[in-house]
Image (cartoon, coloured by chain):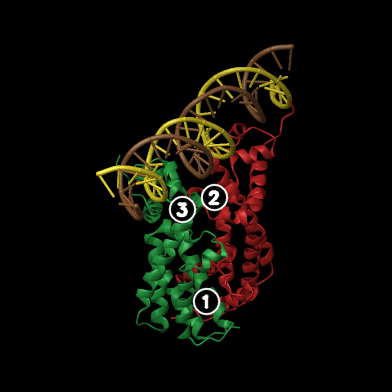
Chain colours: A red, B green, C brown, D yellow
Amino acid sequence: MARAGVTADRLTVVAADLADEIGLENVTVAALARHFGVKDASLYFHIRNARDLRVRVALLALAELADRVAAALAGRAGKDALVAFANAYRDYARRHPGRYAAMQIDLDPETAAASAGVRHAEMTRAILRGYRLPEPDQTDAVRMMHSTFHGFVSLERTGGFRHTPRATDDSWSRALDALDAVLRNWPPA
Amino acid sequence: MARAGVTADRLTVVAADLADEIGLENVTVAALARHFGVKDASLYFHIRNARDLRVRVALLALAELADRVAAALAGRAGKDALVAFANAYRDYARRHPGRYAAMQIDLDPETAAASAGVRHAEMTRAILRGYRLPEPDQTDAVRMMHSTFHGFVSLERTGGFRHTPRATDDSWSRALDALDAVLRNWPPA
DNA sequence: GTAGTAGCCTAGCTCTCCTAGGCAAACGAT
DNA sequence: ATCGTTTGCCTAGGAGAGCTAGGCTACTAC
């Protein structure tokens, strides 16, 4: 009998693709096994459990997104960098809803510290260098930036903006303008 | 045999409380039935299915939050109103994580239109009257406000701010200052 | 070529969601 | 008061998910 050649990495990629297609909550171990033409029990040789699988998808997504953001950021500074970061972030979330959903699961501290999440934090702070903010203002600004990005993308995805006809792309641009303005004039008190 | 006196409303409230305690994803029909000392199959007389139960929790949460926000907003205007709204929102989300999680599920358009979500939108626009924004800036501002609130609360809840020691309460205040500043000086382009 | 390990299998447990159909308690009408 | 009728719960059971235990087989290293 030919082997299916399953590895944890291939499992993770297929799970991520599946999540983007049918939603993360529908990515079951059984469905994943079916995709590989293999019995569900066989997957437990490669992954610890269902949660482990989702965590792996989350780590993959964090790394992919960090790569895209880094590429978008290359050679840019100031508002250019801010907009590039934001668009890369939103783009990734929209193209990969399942991966983005996985990114939101609560990683335990060690896993989070070893993830590409730290690269996100570094890049965010790199953008803020252009705005010359001292601590703790920089931390506050990082948190506000991240909140705006995540909040907007998240609400857009769950249909929170549907009731108003205004194009979300336009609202997004204005939000970035607003963010840039407030960063330039920080502290805002 | 004495009847347990289950109604859809009591079911919804207990499900919401349970969600706050053990997380929305752990609120199963079976667990809920156990809480009422009743078999799981009996609950299907009151609710359509598991999703219906979650939607009911979401509608309950939206209504509760709208009430709290309305109370917080009474007699306030301008930045006072903004801060009161924001704090009521964050407070509710932190006190009721399960209910808040339920609020994020994707309601179909008719259900959403009949929900207390429309009161949220009205109240948000009421706050913006103090900032005198014309359309479509007002819509953009509503979306940015909502994004900031939801994003911050959401990241705070999933531990997104854990890696930096800075107190989240302080960052929250600064974010509200920033939001107020940007609303006063809109359009920020 | 043989030993060991890696990769898959079957069998089977528990739990969840949900349907079908039955019975008894409460209630409204006579 | 009693007789349907409705309401509220029940048992039984199927499908599918997560996961464990233990067995067989194909590849790999020596």
Q: Nearest the camera: C26 or B141? A: C26
Q: Is residue A65 left or right of residue A51?
A: right
Q: Earlier in the sequence, mark 3 or mark 1?
A: 3
> Residue tagged by mark 1?
B142
Residue pictured at 56% horizontal, 78% vertical: B139
> Residue tagged by mark 3?
B53
Q: Nearer the viewer, mark 3 or mark 1?
A: 3
> Residue tagged by mark 2?
A114
Are discs 2 and 1 located on one and the same chain?
A: no
User: Could one spot residue B149 in this view of the protein?
Assistant: yes
Q: Please, what secondary structure does the residue beneath circle 2 have?
A: loop
User: Could one spot residue B161 in this view of the protein?
Assistant: no
Q: Is residue A156 left or right of residue B32?
A: right
Place of residue B119 in the rendered image (x, y in percent of width and height, measured from the top left): 45, 73
Q: Nearer the viewer, mark 2 or mark 1?
A: 1
Tell me which corner region of the image, top left, top right, bottom left or bottom right, holds residue C6: top right
